[in-house]
Image (cartoon, helix red, strand yellow):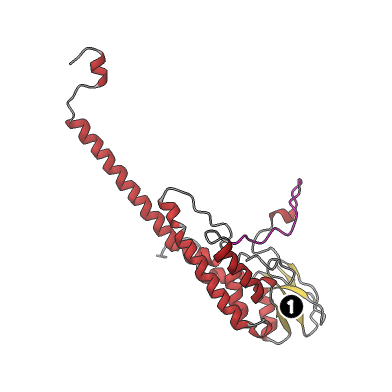
Amino acid sequence: MALPLPPGLTPAEVAFLCEMEMVTVVPRQRLESLALIGGPTQPLRPPHRAPLPLWLALLLKRQRRANILPPPWLLPSSLERILKQETEIDPQGFSSPPPHPYPIRAVPSHTDTISPPFLPSSTADAPPDYLPYHWLELGEILLEACSDDLQEPGRVRTLLRDLREVRMAKMRGSTKDLQGGGVSSLNGVGAMEVSEGRAFIVGVMDGLRKLGSSRETARREREEDEGAGGGGVSDEDEEMGFE
């Protein structure tokens, strides 16, 4: 008998989905278009840039047939600005996700339904000051697979670690709003952060739910005890003249 699967995606599954993200490569060899499930790729013609899914870009990188251009948000200067936004400008909230690259039309089109990871938020043309949905796992993958293509990889690794710690502390702190009966906003939180913080947040919510249930049970028992042992004259009896 198969054991029930835990709710949500595991970190390994999130990293696997991250490989569908589009990145920009600089080919070192010619390669004709490939027919993929998501559509045909652009023909690779050195030294012209081309967008490719991350999994294919990593394969060509290992074969030394292409170099991967880091997205602008993965540059040290961009990460430093984002870290400043997280720690100084808005220490309580999360930095905003990248804006939608396509205008929302009155008559919906296929681009209006595009969402992560199918947005071009990690290509060389992506905005520099926004963390995309798969920022954490994509940064770690690129640091491991093509650190020679990154600017100051050691500095990038340190900034990613600092951002991760700051944002995880905010996620843990957001449970205080839940304890007070408020609503915690996780707008801007990435896929890996959701996966890693799910167990903690769900555990807190379950604990609050059990605590609220026990309080409600105690209140009802107290009301029943007071009603059973009251024996006094109710307001309705007093109005009817009974004493």
232 relative position to 62: left or right: left
Across and down, in percent, residue 206 comes to 38, 54
| x 79%, y 75%: residue | 33
| x 25%, y 13%: residue | 240
Across and down, in percent, residue 7 comes to 47, 60
Q: Which residue is mark 1?
A: 25
The reply to whether residue 144 is in sight is no
Q: Give the amino acid at mark 1.
A: Val
Q: Main SS of the magenta segment?
A: loop
Pick the front one: 42 or 216: 216
Q: Residue furthest top?
A: 241
229 relative position to 153: left or right: left
Across and down, in percent, residue 161 comes to 53, 75
| x 79%, y 73%: residue | 42
150 versus 95 height, above or below? below
Pick the front one: 235 or 4: 235
Residue 56 drawn in magenta? no
| x 33%, y 50%: residue | 211
- Callout 1: SS: strand
In the picture, which quadrant includes the N terminus?
Answer: bottom left
54 relative position to 232: left or right: right
Q: Residues within 10 Å of mark 1 (few under 14, many from 20)?
A: many
Across and down, in percent, residue 112 comes to 71, 53
Q: Residue furthest bottom?
A: 64
In the picture, which quadrant includes the C terminus?
Answer: top left
The segment highlighted magenta reads 95-109
| Residue 226: quarter of image | top left
145 versus 172 height, above or below? below
Pick the front one: 35 or 225: 225
Pick the front one: 109 or 104: 104
Residue 98 drawn in magenta? yes
